[in-house]
Image (cartoon, grey):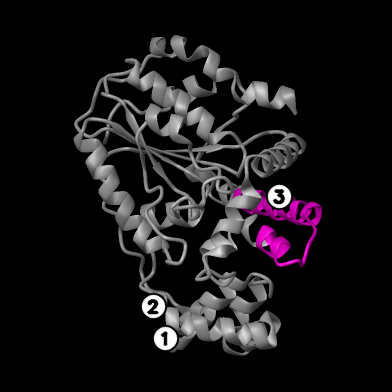
Amino acid sequence: MRIFDRAIFASARAVDKLSSVNLPEQTETPPLLAISGPTAAGKSALVLDVCDALASGAGPWAGAEIVSVDSAQVYRGMDIGTAKPDRAARARVPHHLLDILDPAEAYSAARFAADAQAAIAAIRARGHIPLLVGGTLLYFRALFEGLNDLPAANAEFREQLEAEASELGWGVLHARLAQIDPRRAQRLHPNDTQRVQRALEIAHFSGAPASEQQGQPQPPNLPGTIVRLAVMPPDRVALTLRIEARLRQMVDSGFVEEVARLRARGDLHLGLPAMRAVGYRQLWRHLDGDYSLDEAIRLTVIATRQYAKRQMTWLRGEAEKWQWIDPTEPNAAARVLSSVPKSSE
């Protein structure tokens, strides 16, 4: 574990050397760097090193700013469990799309795409490079490829489904989906409640199964060069150990207390997208008396490992779009910098 951590953060010791990396001359539109990868892979530390190098003159741009691509970090009061950048990191590099919503509110990939485009335009106007960093891959897809013209989320209908699920169980709603949209139901586990809910919502308001929706995605409006980098640890065992250690550190830092504060508000519940975030729902149920703390931690580790596996599977399925970066390489930050193309064409 310690070897893995030292390797991931080795680039921090070489930041002062990164200014020697041969970067291209400035283009009319600063490039956009998208950096994703599985949770706990070391994306944040790597990106901060890259930003430090750019701010110190490694290249012709005036610096860099980070746009968070994380469906949980948008929520205020959800800091520890989302591994949100702390005050020191935010003072070091400007961050965007953090703490923009209350946990009682819903956020969507479509809204993210609009918010991100606005942030990117503002960052580029300052002569800075936008670095999109996070693991919510649907958000990257919404921004780069666009989304089909599907019905928007409907809070009233979702509350109705939540009430039915509380009484009958999500298995019954999954069976209903199997009657309406068998192809989509076959791809979804009954416990994947958010996607089951969304599939039922699409079918209800569009009048057609989600699997048959063939609307053309809206084209993105992102001028200039886009470089996509996937931070992929080569050692899955080390990644699992890092996931476990990070969760223990979160608990020691007050994760349980953070969930307790959210739960004590009285207006939040496990049916909300924010409260479905990994770790929050498990610790909420611990506070409800359903699990011991050790069991909640064990279940959170399992859920996080499954999430990391889904992220890696998604990225491998789009291998032609992403350049692989090994975060354990000592020169990982320099590799990121050298990936910037020579023109924005």
Kind of element beneath mark 3: helix
Amino acid residing under circle 2: Pro
Residue 305's disc is 3
Decide: marks 2, 1 in contact (CB < 8 A)?
A: yes
Highlighted range, magenta: 282-311
Q: Position of residue 298 (x, y in %)?
A: 78, 52
Decide: marks 3, 1 in contact (CB < 8 A)?
A: no
Query: Marks 2 and 1, Cα distance to the nearest angstrom?
Result: 6 Å
Query: Marks 3 and 2, Cα distance to the nearest angstrom?
Result: 31 Å
Q: For mark 1, does the 10 Å Cα neighbourhood hold few (<14), some (14 to 19), or many (20 or more) residues?
A: some
Residue 205's disc is 1
Kind of element beneath mark 1: helix
Q: Nearer the viewer, residue 300 or 203?
A: 300
Q: Is residue 15 above or below residue 33?
A: above
Q: Position of residue 175 (x, y in %)?
A: 67, 86
Residue 151's disc is 2
Residue 184's disc is none
Q: In terms of sequence position, does the residue under pointer 2 or pointer 1 come before the other? A: 2
Q: Nearer the viewer, residue 243 or 38?
A: 243
Query: Marks 3 and 1, Cα distance to the nearest angstrom?
Result: 34 Å
